[in-house]
Image (tube, grey):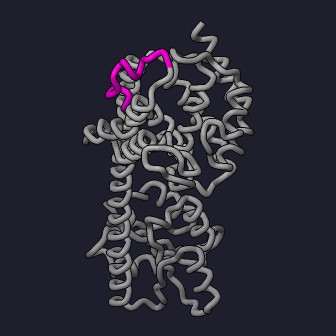
Amino acid sequence: MRSKVLIVDDLEMNREMLAAILEKEYPILEADSGKNAITMIQEHQDEIAVVLLDLVMPEMDGFAVLEVMKDHSWLKTIPVLVITAESKAGVESKCFEMGVSDFIKKPFDNAIVRNRVKNIVDLFAYKNQLEEKVEKQTATLKKQYKLLVMQAEKLKESNTHIIDILGTVVECRNLESGEHVKRVKGFTRILAEQMMIDYPEYGLTQEKIDVIVSASSLHDIGKIAIPDSILLKPARLTKEEYEYMKSHTTRGCDVLNNVVGVWDEAYSKASYDICRHHHERYDGKGYPDGLAGDAIPISAQLVGLADVYDALVSERVYKSAYSEDEAFHMIVSGECGVFSPKLLECFRKVKKQFEELNQLQNKKQQ
């Protein structure tokens, strides 16, 4: 506890006079030089409540003592009252710039000395207590923040795990390709990262892209509600069968709406948007809602193109795989529906990356 007063003055009479004024309220320490003052502060820095410092001393004057105290950051917790007969504005200004709290003028007035010392000791005691509380609260907040970050990471992992499980359920029912979901995720990430660079107006960030990529696993979740006779038919679907197949978008949303309280809002919204709208087209001729332009969520636009590309370059029960060049030209020419010009521009830039990913996935399957 800080309760001691350190009186620093080369004149013994001054030290004795100040000690006599203050000794009833405070334990007194004395130093007869600047050098001894520094030693005393080093030894009692956690006990000293205030320093009464004379400026005019041989060898090491009061300004030199203040410099050392400033360098050691002692002035942050130990206030200094300067003992001076000087009344020059320049001296006072320099003292305040160096961190002095106040002045005690010679000749000493007992009441003024006591009140000035008491006021500054009480002020710094409150300040130091407040800073200690803030420091403890800051440490507590840091721990709580760290815990929240860990919880957020666990929630993110949980969201991703749930989505992957649901995506795997679709793969088990849909015999087209067990790697389809993984490839769509890869194509979506490549395309999204290029969109983030070229078109910042869409507000894509790495965190949002991570959510979109993860949620892309659920783009075909509604196919679990499609009968095998339609889902696995090794021939072209009839008009009625095709209309039923298209309902996988809305049926998937029904499934997602029943998954309540499991994942956070960002994952829930991205999953819903992608599931419902990944077959919408930029000219409004897609399904199920006929959305046009940027009324289609950017997440669904990205996954929609990634899904079409993978469908083209993959062998299915009803068709052979197209070459990568054929798939590319079919998409940019509009044979697979109209996509956003901005999306297609990014697709052109990442053509090689799409091809490399597709070839890598094909090697893994062999």
Image coords of residue 96 (percent x, y): 56, 80
67 inside magenta stretch: no
Q: Is residue 140 above or below residue 246?
A: below
Foreground residue among 2 and 96 = 96
Image coords of residue 225 (percent x, y): 32, 28
Foreground residue among 314 and 336 = 336
Residue occupying image coordinates x 62% and y 85%: 91
The main secondary structure of the magenta stretch is helix
Image coords of residue 15 (percent x, y): 44, 76
Q: Is residue 303 above or below residue 173?
A: below
Foreground residue among 134 and 305 = 305
Q: In which quadrant of the rendered image does the N terminus lie? A: bottom left
Q: Which residues are magenta?
A: 221-235
Residue occupying image coordinates x 35% and y 42%: 147
Q: Is residue 173 visible?
A: yes
Q: Is residue 221 visible?
A: no
